Amino acid sequence: MNARSITIGEAARQSGVKVPTIRFYEQIGLLPAPSRSEGNRRQYDEKDLSRLAFIRHARELGFDVADIRELLTLTEQPQSSCHEADSIAARHLREIEERIAKLQALRGELKRMVNECGHGKVCECRVIQVLADHGRCQSDIH
């Protein structure tokens, strides 16, 4: 077994990344094109698996492709400052906190709508009234 003898199916199994996603990552340049066997099959190695794991974990944490691309570029310069990586993560954290605030406002508005509904007829339904008139919302965040 040589260093590049892992098939795409095995790479998918070991990394937890689906085969079509691996191909997509190759197409967009997040994963370098692997070498090919004599039968033209893709062949991966441990470095590819590590890169796939990095990408998968970053995606699970919600990083977008552009940020992942930049973070991967930074990993190629292990002795450089991690300031840029910190900046990317801090920006992503701010975006997540903004989304959480919007979701909390949305949750509050929906709870209020449901709680104020008398469960009578549609013509008196608070949910319908609020959806029809944004001015009846208590929050503009959502």
Image: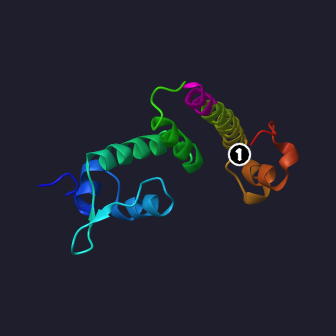
Where residue 76 sits: x, y (%)? 45, 38
Residue 85 included in the magenta stretch of the image = yes
The residue shown at (34%, 63%) is: 19
Kind of residue sitting beneath label 1:
Gly
Quarter occupied by the N terminus: bottom left
Q: Nearer the viewer, residue 117 or 131?
A: 131
In the image, which residues are magenta? 82-90
Residue 119 sits above or below residue 24 on the image: above
Q: Residue furthest bottom?
A: 39
Q: Which of 90 and 27 lies nearest the eye of the viewer?
A: 27
Q: Quadrant of residue 55?
A: top left
> Relative to 14, is 142 on the left or the right?
right
Q: Residue shown at 29%/56% (left/top)?
A: 12
Horizontal arrangement in the rendering, residue 46 relative to residue 133 (left or right): left
Residue 24, horizontal then vertical, whole percent? 45, 63
Q: Is most of the magenta stretch helix, strand or loop?
A: helix
Vertically, is 24 above or below 93? below
Where is the C terminus found, in terms of image quarters? top right
Q: Quadrant of residue 136?
A: top right
The number of discs equals 1
Q: Which x, y percent locates residue 81?
A: 55, 24
Taking the image as shown, residue 127 lies to the left or right of residue 82, namely right
Q: Is residue 97 left or right of residue 35?
A: right
Nearest the viewer among 118 and 60 is: 60
Within 10 angstroms of label 1, few (less than 14), some, or many (20 or more) residues? few
Q: Residue at x 65, y 32 (%)?
A: 91
Q: Position of residue 4 (x, y in %)?
A: 23, 55
Q: Which residue is mark 1?
A: 118
For residue 87: magenta?
Answer: yes
Instruction: Determine the secondary structure under disc 1.
Output: loop
Q: Residue furthest left?
A: 1
